Structure formats: structure tokens, C-alpha cells
């Protein structure tokens, strides 16, 4: 299986290069990996002590950030290298000053793994949540470099726990320690002979709690919201937007709506704006104007959604109509507000928990969306009970990053 895996990786490398010209994302994926070693040798010297943190994309980066920030405080002289697999994470965070180097991870060939790890010579390696790269893990194990998997979340459907998953199971056995999110993950690992685990929760709770300490004031949101109830729909996709637009166009309540689409390309933003019959303004159109008379504000930029959530009385989080696509529900939950999502939330532990606790409500039709939203608006008892569930859940689960760094102290 190991030989087959390496053959597949090399075939994938060839195919990726062949289709570079047909996909902007693939082009970034390929071009971003050029000259990695030149960058690393300029930024990292043989005398440096390096901690390497690898994340798949933006969500995992946010998960690893509380650990990174604490490590920098405890070990200020260490060099921190952060790698991404996906362009969607790297392109947004490539200039973040929190790390000494932010780069793409070269594809998982044995040659790349040896060269990359020899260049960094890390003292400690942290993989976040799902990242299992057999060649990198093999080289790290051979070099006896401490390697952690943090905020790990395992499901019985994964190949590690199937009869045919022996090769990937072997990769898991290379980790020094696992910090898992729940008891189910721990039991699954124990079922394949892995006992070096700690149930530690999810570091994203620490991350979102930091949001409350920041200045979340936005003058344009003060101007827009006034004293009205405000629904903020974050990271929306077309199907959820259809439910939302239907409600907006047919609602006679005094509500303000903020929509922050996942796709902010001009044609899609224009189509969304034209579908709404009430007064709509784009964020890019504000230019200091008084927007208090508008009913709907469309955020056609990135990077401010978290602060916008602080003005929400109710949140809708997009992506829940596509398997594996649900966006971050913890960002609005930390503000203690009710949340509505689509029906496909399995695999997102926090969403599963909050749906069970009834702090998050799911919707599968326009009628259901409107019913839930109207009840949250009209029934104050229902509203406050739902809101308090979300805030209590976030605060109850804080502290994971502190425990991980305490463990790291025993390694370094």
C-alpha cells in the first residue's frame, strides 16, 4: 500500500501541473510551492530552534492560532513556521506577522518530506485536526521529532477504522500524542491500539473567545442597524440565500438584514442584490453615506464578518445545504445569539452539539426558515433560552490550548 500511495501522489503531481492553466486555484497551488526552499533557507538558519505548525486551510489555521500565540509567549526565541495545503488559507494569511514563515506544504512525496524536514529541522511539529501525510509522518518518526495532532476529531466512517485502512493506521501510530475533541475519538483510537491520547476539546473555543476581548466596533454597522432587530447571514451560498431573500421580500417586520456571501464576485453580488425587493446597499457603496434608511446591507468584502456578528440579534450561518460545507457556527455563538443553519451539519461537532442542545436550529425549506425566524423574533422567552445555550456552550469548552501548551512544556 505504501508503494501504491507514492505512485498515486506522483501521478497527482503530474496531473496538477497539466491542469494548472485551467484553474486559478490550481495555479496558485502550483506557483505558491515554487522557491519554497529558497525562502526557508533565507528565513531559517541552522542555529534556530523551529516549531512547525501545519494546517490544511483557513479553518484549521484559526484552530491552531491559540496554540501558536501561547507558544510565542512561552518560547519567544523560537522560530515559528506555519504551512498550508490549500490556497484558500494561504492566500488570506500569507502575510500574517504572527509566524516567522508562512508557506505552502510541498506535496507528500518522500523526497519532498525529507528535504522539507531537513531544511526546517524542527524541534516540535503540530498538525491540526485532520492532516495525515504518511511520508512526512514517516520522516518525522525516523528522526524522532515530537509530533502532535491537536483538536483531532475522528469518526468511525474514516479509513483508519476499516479493514482496508492498515496503511493509514500505521501513519497514525507515528504521532507522539493526540489531543482529541471528544470521548468517541479517544475510543476509536483505542480500538486500533492507540492510547497516547488526551480528551482536550477544540482549540477554536479559545480562538472565538478572544473575539470578545477585541474592539468590534464598526461605525457603518451602528449607522445601519439603529435600534432595529438585526439578522446577520454569514458565509452564505445560493440555496440559503434563496430562503433568506424569500423572507426579506415577504416580511413586514422592522428588521435589518446583513448578508455576507461566501462568493463575493461581482456577477453573484449583483444577482443577489437584484433579487431583493427592499432597499439594498453594498458595503462597497457606502462611502460615508447615511445607510440607516436601507433594509439590507450586503458585505461584498472579506475580513470583517466576525465584527459584524457582534451586531447580530440572530445569525444564519451558510454552507449547511452541502455535505461538509457548513461554515463556522462558533463565531456567532460566542456573542450569545440564536443561530439558524441548513440541514447538513453532521461531522461538525459544535453544530451537532448545539443542534442537540437547541441553541442552533436547522431549516430545510423556506417555510421552515420563516417559521423559526419569526418565533425567535416574537417569542422573547424562546429567544433568550436559545441565545443563552450558545453562550454557555462556548464558555464551558474553553481552555484546550492552555492544556496543549502545558504538555508542550514537557517536550521542550
Image (tube, rainbow, N blue to C red):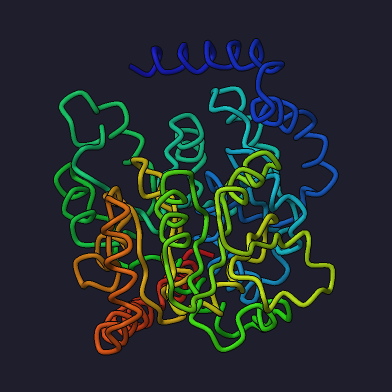
**Residue 56 or residue 111, whichever sits in front:** 56
Q: Is residue 260 left or right of residue 373?
A: right
Vertical position of residue 4 compared to residue 287: above or below: above
The residue shown at (56%, 79%) is: 311
Q: Is residue 64 left or right of residue 347?
A: right
Residue 407 appears in view? no
Vertical position of residue 405 compared to residue 197: above or below: below
The residue shown at (40%, 79%) is: 337
The residue shown at (75%, 35%) is: 36
Which quadrant of the figure contains the C terminus? bottom right
The residue shown at (77%, 48%) is: 46
**Residue 270 or residue 132, whichever sits in front:** 270
Vertical position of residue 211 compared to residue 159: above or below: below
Residue 2 appears in view? yes
- Estimate the x, y position of residue 172 in percent, counting from the top left: 33, 40
- Estimate the x, y position of residue 371 in percent, counting from the top left: 27, 66
Amino acid at each position: 500500500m505504501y508503494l501504491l500511495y507514492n505512485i498515486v501522489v506522483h501521478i497527482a503531481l503530474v496531473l496538477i501541473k497539466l491542469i494548472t492553466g485551467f484553474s486559478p486555484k490550481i495555479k496558485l497551488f502550483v506557483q505558491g510551492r515554487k522557491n519554497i526552499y529558497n525562502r526557508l533557507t533565507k528565513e531559517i538558519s541552522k542555529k534556530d530552534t523551529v516549531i512547525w505548525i501545519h494546517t490544511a486551510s483557513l479553518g484549521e489555521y484559526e484552530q491552531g492560532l491559540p496554540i501558536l500565540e501561547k507558544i510565542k509567549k512561552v518560547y519567544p526565541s523560537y522560530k515559528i513556521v506555519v504551512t498550508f495545503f490549500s490556497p484558500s488559507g494561504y492566500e488570506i494569511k500569507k502575510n500574517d506577522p504572527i509566524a516567522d514563515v508562512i508557506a505552502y506544504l510541498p506535496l507528500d512525496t518522500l523526497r519532498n518530506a525529507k528535504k522539507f524536514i531537513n531544511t526546517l529541522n524542527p524541534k516540535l511539529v503540530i498538525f491540526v485536526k485532520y492532516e495525515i501525510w504518511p511520508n512526512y509522518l514517516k520522516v518525522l518518526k525516523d528522526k524522532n521529532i515530537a509530533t502532535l495532532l491537536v483538536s483531532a476529531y475522528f469518526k468511525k466512517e474514516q479509513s483508519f477504522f476499516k479493514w482496508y485502512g492498515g496503511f493509514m493506521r500505521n501513519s497514525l501510530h507515528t504521532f507522539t500524542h493526540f489531543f482529541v475533541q471528544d470521548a468517541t475519538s479517544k475510543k476509536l483510537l483505542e480500538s486500533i491500539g492507540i492510547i497516547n491520547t488526551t480528551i482536550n476539546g477544540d482549540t477554536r473555543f479559545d480562538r472565538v473567545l478572544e473575539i470578545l476581548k477585541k474592539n468590534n466596533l464598526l461605525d457603518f454597522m451602528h449607522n445601519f442597524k439603529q435600534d432595529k432587530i438585526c439578522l446577520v447571514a454569514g458565509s452564505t451560498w445560493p440555496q440559503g440565500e434563496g430562503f433568506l431573500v424569500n423572507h426579506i421580500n415577504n416580511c413586514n417586520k422592522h428588521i435589518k438584514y446583513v448578508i455576507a456571501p461566501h462568493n463575493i464576485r461581482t456577477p453573484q453580488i449583483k444577482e443577489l442584490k437584484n433579487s431583493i425587493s427592499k432597499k439594498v446597499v453594498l458595503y462597497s457603496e457606502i462611502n460615508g453615506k447615511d445607510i440607516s434608511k436601507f433594509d439590507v446591507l450586503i458585505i461584498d468584502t472579506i475580513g470583517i464578518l466576525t465584527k459584524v456578528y457582534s451586531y447580530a440579534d440572530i445569525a444564519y450561518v451558510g454552507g449547511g445545504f452541502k455535505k461538509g460545507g457548513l461554515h463556522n457556527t462558533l463565531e456567532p455563538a460566542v456573542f450569545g445569539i440564536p443561530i439558524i443553519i441548513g440541514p447538513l451539519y453532521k461531522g461538525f461537532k459544535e453544530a451537532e452539539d448545539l443542534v442537540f442542545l437547541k441553541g442552533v436550529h436547522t431549516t430545510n425549506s423556506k417555510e421552515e426558515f420563516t417559521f423559526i425566524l419569526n418565533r425567535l423574533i416574537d417569542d422573547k422567552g424562546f429567544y433568550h433560552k436559545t441565545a443563552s445555550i450558545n453562550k454557555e456552550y462556548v464558555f464551558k469548552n474553553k481552555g484546550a490550548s492552555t492544556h496543549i501548551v502545558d504538555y508542550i512544556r514537557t517536550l521542550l
